[in-house]
Image (cartoon, helix red, strand yellow):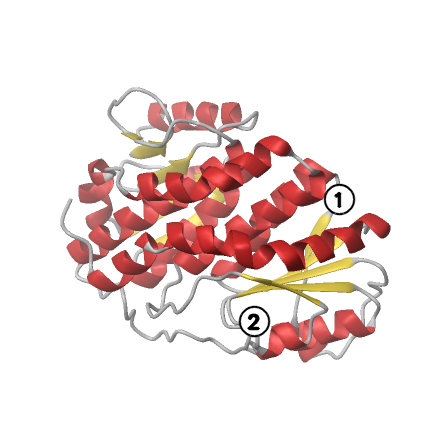
Amino acid sequence: MKPMAAGMRSELCDAASAVRQQAQMIAEPLAALIKRLSRRRPDLVMTCARGSSAHAATFAKHLFERHLGIPVAAAAPNIASVYRRHLNLKDQLFLSVSQSGRSDDLIEMAAMARTAGAMTVAIVNVPDSPLAAASEFILPLGAGTELSVAATKTFVASLAALLQMTATWTDDAAMGQSCVRLPERLAEATELDWSEALAPLTHANSLAAIGRGPTLAIAGEAALKLKETCELHGEAFSAAEFHHGPMALVSSAFPILAFSPNDESAESLEDLVSDLRRKGACVFVAEPGRPQSGRLPTLRPEHPDADAICLIQSFYAFLVTLAGCRGTNVDNPRHLKKVTRTK
């Protein structure tokens, strides 16, 4: 693989140290939050986020529903910022995720939720941001400055914070240990070689990214990053959802990038991949196992949810090389800016 561009490479390589630092920064506010949650368990979690942070919220949905049995719904921020409608959120958990904490619609939605009696939590990289000020609890990402327009270490840090929150809330020792090991494993994941997929994706016009369970959020983030940094249209699907219409897109000229989960949901994705290959699709699967054609290397499985975070780290390393091959500026994508403020 070619050397990575300095900006994004530097920042994605900083992800491991950011997650390690985050563990200390988040401990005290997380303990206070969990103490509050133990007194009054919510019946619903509402997430609020945009862009990469919205994919982090998808990861939260998986974690909270899978490990806590609490339903999770995504907020439509314009309900507050445009329609000025108040929602019945008394005693529920409202969780916003943001890098900058400066998007007006997220701020207004958080303020509305707090006024409605929700317990409001902001997972944010700028702890003195307006979004943090509008929220009762602040869980800092601790990722430091991120200059590249496309988020990498802040996304990884968001997933790490959500994993730590879930481990603490559920008192899950195995998940907690996976959080401790995560920085080391992120560093290892950065070095994995996904160059087999380089040539097909360099010349592609569009592709599908597929995940299931803990990797659905990873597929969503991968599809977004391909648009942002490579000017390559990517669309994300659940392995189950792909059967409902998108299967008609399958051809040898339509690459598919699949992120295999290391849990019970893997079987359905494996079945889909086998079917896609029978139909002549060009499929690359990030999954553990012996090297073979179409398989992108991953770390040895440890914990399914932490393993998913390591997958996006390996993808980011591949992404920077892919952008170079496609001739795009990975650090300053066209038409985009670092902080996006929507109403």
- Asked if 105 appears above or below 163 in the picture, the reply is below
Disc 1: CA contacts within 10 A as few (<14), some (14-19) or many (>=20): some
Residue for point 54% across, 54% down: 24
**Location of residue 142 in the rendering, given as x and y in whole percent from the top left corner:** 48, 62
Residue for point 68% across, 77% down: 108
Q: In which quarter of the image is residue 196?
A: top left
Q: Mark 2 points at which residue?
A: 127
Disc 2: CA contacts within 10 A as few (<14), some (14-19) or many (>=20): some
Report the front residue among 291 and 129. Answer: 129
| Gap in angstroms between the C-alphas marked 1 and 2 | 27 Å
Asked if one can make out residue 195 in the rendered structure from this viewpoint, the answer is yes
Is the residue under label 2 in contact with that under label 1 (CB below 8 Å)?
no
**Location of residue 148 in the rendering, given as x and y in whole percent from the top left corner:** 32, 67
- Asked if 165 appears above or below 125 in the picture, the reply is above
Which image quarter holds the C terminus?
bottom right
Which image quarter holds the N terminus?
top left
Asked if one can make out residue 156 in the rendered structure from this viewpoint, the answer is no
Secondary structure under tag 1 reads loop
Residue for point 30% across, 61% down: 229
Q: Residue 221 carries which label?
A: none
Q: What residue type is labelled 2?
A: Pro
**Location of residue 18 in the rendering, given as x and y in whole percent from the top left corner:** 42, 56
Q: Which of marks 1 and 2 is in front?
A: 2
Q: 143 left or right of 118? A: left
Q: Which amino acid does label 1 sit on?
A: Ile
Residue for point 81% across, 48% down: 38
- Asked if 311 appears above or below 60 in the picture, the reply is above
Earlier along the polypeptide chain: callout 1 or callout 2?
A: 1
Q: Name the residue under label 1.
A: 70
Q: 343 left or right of 197? A: right
Report the front residue among 309 and 284. Answer: 309
**Location of residue 261 in the rendering, given as x and y in whole percent from the top left corner:** 48, 32
